[in-house]
Image: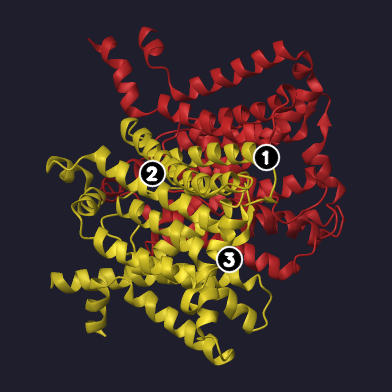
Amino acid sequence: MRRWLISPSPILLAYAAALLLFVLVSFYSPGFANPAHVATLITLAAFIGIAAIGQTIVIVGGGIDLSVPWIMNSAAILATALAHGQDWALLWIAPLILLAGAAVGVVNGIGIALLRVPPIVMTMSVNVITQGLLLIATRGFPPPLAPKALTAVAAGKIGPFPVILLVWIILAVAIVVVERRTSFGRYLYALGSNRTVATLSGVPVARTTIAAYAISGTTAALAGILLCGYSRQAYLGMGDPYLFTTIAAVAIGGASILGGTGSYLGTVAGALVLIILTGVLPILKLDVGALKIIYGLVILVTVFISAPSLRELMRRPGSK
Amino acid sequence: MNAFVTLARRHLWLPPLLVLVVLGIAIGIMRPGTFAIDQINIKVAAAMTLILIATGETIVVSRGGIDLSVGGILSLTTAICATRGDPGLAESIFWIGFVLVLGALVGVLNSVIITIGKLQPFVVTLATWSILEGCALMVLPAESSGVPDSWVAVEHVTPLGIGVPIMLLGILVSLWAWFSRTRIYNAIRAAGSNERSAYLNRVSVLGTNAWAYGLSGFFAAAAGLYFSTQTGAGHPTVGTQYVLPAIAAVVIGGTSLLGGRGTLMGTIVGAFILTLIGDVVFLLKLQSYWQWVMSGFILMLVVILTGLTESRSSSGSGS
């Protein structure tokens, strides 16, 4: 118990921060905690959360995925362009787009694992290429509206609960099981903490890396499809904010960008913290500039708290 | 072929220079008059912001780090420049100095957080980028003109037909010729190639970080100054457009993200390649978006080729 108090896990801290923030703001502005508003916040957090599933997996494995924004954007635009507003068409379009996302992820993974391109460079190139191809294909014109069924999933509610929360919970449980109970999960943590050791101890490095980026491509595509349902249309640039927010959610959730640590549970807390902060702005009458400053400070503070050096320092009096 | 590999290993900027020459010749054939001095002035002017920002990035990358906050410094600098009203000479000098010192201090602050907290440069500078861009939006909420006219005028003088950008480029290259031989840069490279053994050889981890990130901040501020005088306007969010291209220019130029070595010549070549791709796309009458696709492919190709020459020559030396 004492040990837990002295060096609490970063994940617990992230949840505590989200809760504390929520309670404080609710006291300050009672309307903040009303169910409809909470549902909106959770829906917005779900988009970050779902897009950040892959980012978490990739970062735990010691990489980073900068191609999330335009995979999301491409998925959104493909969904509206192929469906032409027809609901039934989604049945074949959605799986196809998820597969395409996975394929882009596989390209990332092959470049990184087999051709030894640094993850930053590889995923940055793929992001730029995807962006270019998408703009060329659409000639910069906005495609038609999103199918209604998609909006029903992304923005609909069952009673007071957003449908997307259900989707998010199922995915979160699945990912945590994958992280903890499968050999892929173990390989991922081994790979992230030390690539050389992982290789020598028989971890299939290439396969694990490619699978991680494939998952990231798939979840980014899923987030993109859902996001276009929520905003009822697809537009160019809609994925751009998610480069920062997915990485920020992972960092706030306590995973080290160097890999080997962290869990998706932390990322969920990170996504909640980010969205609650966004919700605080109009209440305090702050603008985007202030939000960016607060985002930056929150990331700095959380990575400082979960930094190995500081935790060592805090643990020292306890171990004496 | 093997001779070229050996040469390319010694001069990392040779392969990208080849690409640049090919691009240049292609453009020269498609549009006669490309190599007239005023055309060159225009091209250098177009590439200069990226060159300045990528110069700092080159130093940080050879230290084994990465600096995303340069985007924030660029945005903040242009915001400050666009809100100075109509300053006199003394005031102008003060503000220019202020901006450059501010950039350097932000960089040093980055290095202190990274070193003391033993944190990853990527996350720390991502956070400070966000903070600085927030500050830029506070100083100047939206894109607007307002950079002092006298500053814009200085940027547009062309004595003997040679523009300020070309002169800046000359100064930059000569400064680098000196800086790359100093003990400071050697220490930065040593710490970048192996921090632990550098530390055991009494190279200061904090000191080398402070120099690298401080210079990076300084050059990002210089890029902001240049950008403001060139456009005459402040853009509080422009940094976003330059962070990844700056890293791309460094990588295309042959500087390894693993640290330990860096070449400004290569970075300058990389920045020109990225700038000229736009021209090629325009001259081929393609949609301008092809620019993105082509730069992505060139970036990937260069890195894969660099990796291949490295593994070839290392296996060669082993046998």
Q: Is residue B170 left or right of residue A23?
A: left
On-image quarter of the C terminus of chain B: bottom left
Which residue is under mark 1? A47
Q: Is residue A194 visible?
A: no
Say which chain tag 2 marks.
A
Which residue is under mark 2? A187
Which residue is under mark 3? A129
Task: Report, in whole angstroms, how far the alpha carbon at label 3 lies from the one at label 2.
Answer: 30 Å
Task: From the top left corner, tell me how far across and down residue A277 is, in percent.
Answer: 64, 27
Q: Amino acid at mark 2?
A: Tyr
In the image, B125 versus B186, the foreground residue is B186
Q: Earlier in the sequence, mark 1 or mark 2?
A: 1
Q: Nearer the viewer, mark 3 or mark 2?
A: 3
Q: Nearer the viewer, mark 1 or mark 3?
A: 3
x 31%, y 66%: residue: B174
Q: Earlier in the sequence, mark 1 or mark 3?
A: 1
Q: Is residue B38 left or right of residue B233?
A: left
